[in-house]
Image (tube, helix red, strand yellow):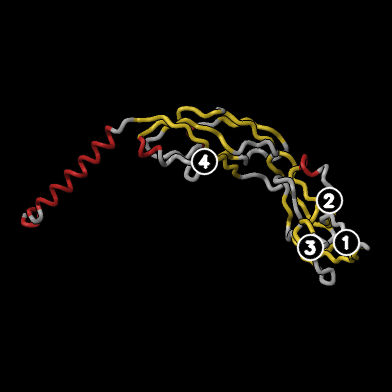
C-alpha cells in the first residue's frame, strides 16, 4: 500500500497523460492521401528478365490518421508482386490490392491508380560484345592504331534490347592529352539502362598516335 502511495502525484499525471494521448489518437480525424510507391518484383526466374516497359511505380490513395499517413512513403511502403508462377516468357495482369501492400496499422487502401498492372517477361540473354575505343576528335593528333584488351565484354539483358546491339564504346579518350606510351585503363559504357556488364567494365587500350603536321 505504501508503494502505491509513493509519488502519487507523478503517477496520476502519467496516467492522465496516457489517457489524453489515447483520446487524441482515437479521435484523430482520418484523411486521404495520394502517394506514388515502388513495385518490388520477387521470385523472378534466373532465365527470364522483366520487359523494359514493366511499371516501376503505382499511385495509391490511402486513408488513415494523419500521424499514420506520414509513414506511407516510397522508403517504407511498396507493392510486392510475386513472379514465382511465371516460368516462361509470358504476360500476366496483377491486381493491386491491400494484400500486396505493407501499409501501417490503421491505414487502409482506398484505390490504386491503375488498379492492375501488366507484367511481361522475356528471355534473359547473355552476349559477348566487341569494345570499340571512343576517341575525342582532334585537329592536332591522329590515331595510327589501337588495341583493346579484353576486346569483348559480356553483357546481360532482356532479349528485345540485345538483338540490335553488337558493340559498346569506351568512355571518351582525348588523344591530345593522353600519354600514348602507357596503356590506358578506361571504362566501357552501356547506354541502355536495361543492359548490364557481367564482370569488370574496365579495359586496357594501347594507342599509337602522331601529331598532324
- Expressed as whole percent of the image width and height from the top left, the position of residue 53 reads 68, 36
Residue at numbered disc 4: 78
Q: Is residue 206 visible?
A: yes
93 to 180, vertically: above or below: above
Where 137 sits versus 86, above or below?
Answer: below
| Rendered residue at 40%/40% (across/down) | 70
Mark before the other along the chain sequence, 3 or 1: 1
Check disc 2 and report the residue beneath it. 167
Distance from the alpha carbon under mark 2 to that under mark 1: 25 Å
Q: Secondary structure at mark 2?
A: strand
Residue at 84% over, 48% down: 166
Q: Which residue is mark 3?
A: 203
What residue is at 84 percent from the left and 72 percent from the top?
Answer: 181
**Total marks in image:** 4
Name the residue: 85% across, 60% down.
Answer: 151
> Up-down: is 210 above or below 4?
below
On the image, the x and y values in percent for residue 180 come to 84, 68
In front: label 1 or label 4: 1
- Measure how far apart labels 1 and 4 are at the Cα level: 54 Å
Q: Nearer the viewer, residue 190 or 38?
A: 190
**Cα distance in 3D space between marks 2 and 4:** 37 Å
Say the numbered circle drawn on residue 141.
1
Q: Around disc 1, counting alpha carbons within 10 Å, would you say few (fewer than 14), some (14 to 19), or many (20 or more)? A: some
Q: Position of residue 159 (x, y in %)?
A: 77, 42
Element marked by disc 3: strand
Name the front one of labels 3 and 1: 1
- Residue with the most extreme front position: 213
Find out whether the residues at labels 2 and 1 contact each other: C-beta distance under 8 Å: no
**Inter-mark Cα distance, 3 to 4:** 38 Å
Q: Earlier in the sequence, mark 2 or mark 4?
A: 4
Let me know if residue 134 appears in the view: no
Residue furthest out toward the bottom: 181
Amino acid at each position: 500500500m505504501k508503494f502505491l502511495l509513493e509519488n502519487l502525484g507523478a503517477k496520476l499525471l502519467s496516467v492522465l497523460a496516457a489517457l489524453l494521448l489515447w483520446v487524441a489518437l482515437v479521435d484523430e480525424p482520418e484523411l486521404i492521401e495520394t502517394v506514388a510507391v515502388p513495385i518490388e518484383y520477387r521470385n523472378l526466374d534466373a532465365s527470364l528478365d522483366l520487359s523494359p516497359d514493366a511499371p516501376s511505380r503505382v499511385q495509391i490513395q490511402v486513408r488513415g490518421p494523419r500521424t499514420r499517413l506520414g509513414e506511407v512513403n516510397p522508403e517504407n511502403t511498396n507493392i510486392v508482386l510475386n513472379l514465382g508462377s511465371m516460368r516462361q516468357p509470358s504476360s500476366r495482369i496483377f491486381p493491386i490490392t491491400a494484400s500486396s501492400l505493407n501499409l501501417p496499422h490503421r491505414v487502409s487502401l482506398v484505390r490504386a491508380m491503375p488498379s492492375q498492372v501488366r507484367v511481361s517477361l522475356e528471355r534473359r540473354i547473355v552476349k559477348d560484345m566487341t569494345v570499340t575505343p571512343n576517341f575525342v576528335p582532334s585537329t592536332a593528333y591522329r590515331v595510327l592504331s589501337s588495341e583493346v584488351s579484353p576486346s569483348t565484354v559480356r553483357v546481360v539483358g532482356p532479349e528485345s534490347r540485345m538483338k540490335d546491339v553488337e558493340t559498346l564504346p569506351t568512355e571518351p579518350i582525348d588523344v591530345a592529352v593522353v600519354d600514348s606510351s602507357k596503356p590506358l585503363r578506361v571504362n566501357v559504357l552501356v547506354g541502355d539502362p536495361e543492359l548490364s556488364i557481367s564482370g569488370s567494365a574496365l579495359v586496357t587500350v594501347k594507342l599509337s598516335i602522331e601529331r598532324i603536321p
